Amino acid sequence: MDGLSGLWRGFRGTLSEAAWLSGDRARAYVRVFGVVVLAVVVVWLLASRDGVDRAGNVLGTDFICFWSASEVAQTGRAAEVYDLKTLKAVQAAIPGVGDTVWPFLYPPTFLLICLPLAALPLFPALAAWLLSTGLAYVLALRLWAGRWLGHVAPLAFPAAFINLAHGQNAFLTTALFAIASWALRRRPLLAGLCFGALVIKPHLGLLIPIALAAGGQWRAFGAAAAAGAGVIFLSVLVFGVDAWRAFLDSAGFSRTILEGGLVDPAKLQSAFAAARMWGLPLGIAYALQAAVLLAAAVAVWRVGRLRPDPAALAATLAAGTLLASPYLLDYDLVLASIPMAWLVGEGLKTGFRSWEKSVVAAAFVLPAISRTAAQATAIPLGPLVLGALFLLVWRRASASSLPDRSCSDPPHH
């Protein structure tokens, strides 16, 4: 009995919040997750045939719209990337696509990023896209978090696999966010350039002006505004005004996708999607999302006004961004790696506070289970876990406000 009692105490201690995320054990866990993710990717690729996986889906499904849009745009018909018939004509030649059409819902600013993809066939372009953006994500997140993170942890995050499987752009947007967050400490102009470049996916930038203005980061604010305007102007030069007219005309279709449930609400991670999943009217769903956005904006503003370390402001901004938009899919959760890395880094340095380890653990596994849980139980884990993550980041960031920290050297993790 004593042996069984000792075994139980050891097992319980391993699972306890006080033990599981301490230093070396944390690194061991993420290495295990990294190996698992790598194994899943290898099996998934080996089980595919002619670019189609065992489930009958084309590899990198969402990437199809990026590549087909580049094929159309490189012929000088950029406005037609928003025409479903034009895209279908390009996509129909891809094995496994069938009658499905992947619409291009992004502004012409993102089309600038897609344009070089036309230089390669679909699957080599997909490989180049994922390798380049994935490398940028890993290096940028390690730069932001510090040496303790290593190179495995960013790829061990389940959201990274989901982004990889969809061929999506969350590696790129998270890399821009991470570089901007790191540069905010000492290189505000670089921070502003990276924040401004997020006009390629505008709904991720809703809280950026609020955070920068509240934190008195006026050089970064000006650089972000100039960079955003510059990217928009460049897209007009390259694609013409007609491309922007076509994009704005397609906004109604994008709204129909969101409101009409053409994207399964279980895939979405927002308060809006939770309300729709529960059958609430459209007006109430929008009101709930607006309330969450307002609460996040006020919280980010208050943290900024406290003048904390820029890293604390950046982590709060990233966590708030995950709550701000009604259109947040599970692959977008790659961005959660920024506030999670900050919380863990601060915890390893100064000690963890109540619930921080548990919520970080929940946020880490969230992308792997949120869609399945929502489909099976109608429980929207996404906004619940992301809300808890934001509250803990906000609590720690608010407490980190010291008058002289904004000009001090950043801590070494």
Image: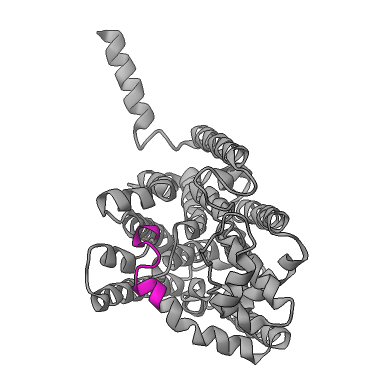
Identify the magenta region.
256-267
Q: Nearer the viewer, residue 187 or 231?
A: 231
Q: Is residue 401 left or right of residue 32?
A: left
Quadrant holding the N terminus? top left
For the question of whether residue 185 can be seen, the reply is no
The colour mode here is: one colour
Q: Position of residue 50 (x, y in %)?
A: 65, 47
Q: Is residue 392 left or right of residue 128?
A: left
Residue depicted at 40% across the width and 58% down the height: 267
Q: Nearer the viewer, residue 174 or 318?
A: 174
* Quadrant housing residue 408: bottom right
Q: Is residue 382 left or right of residue 193?
A: left
* Quadrant housing residue 119: bottom right
Magenta span includes 265 = yes
99 lies above or below 350: below
Q: Position of residue 402 (x, y in %)?
A: 47, 64
Magenta span includes 134 = no
For the question of whether residue 169 can be seen, the reply is yes
Q: Nearer the viewer, residue 407 or 379?
A: 379
* Quadrant housing residue 305: bottom left
Residue depicted at 44% across the width and 61% down the height: 329
Residue depicted at 59% across the width and 87% down the height: 244
Residue depicted at 51% across the width and 74% down the height: 205
Q: Can you name the residue that lies furthest to the right here?
A: 119
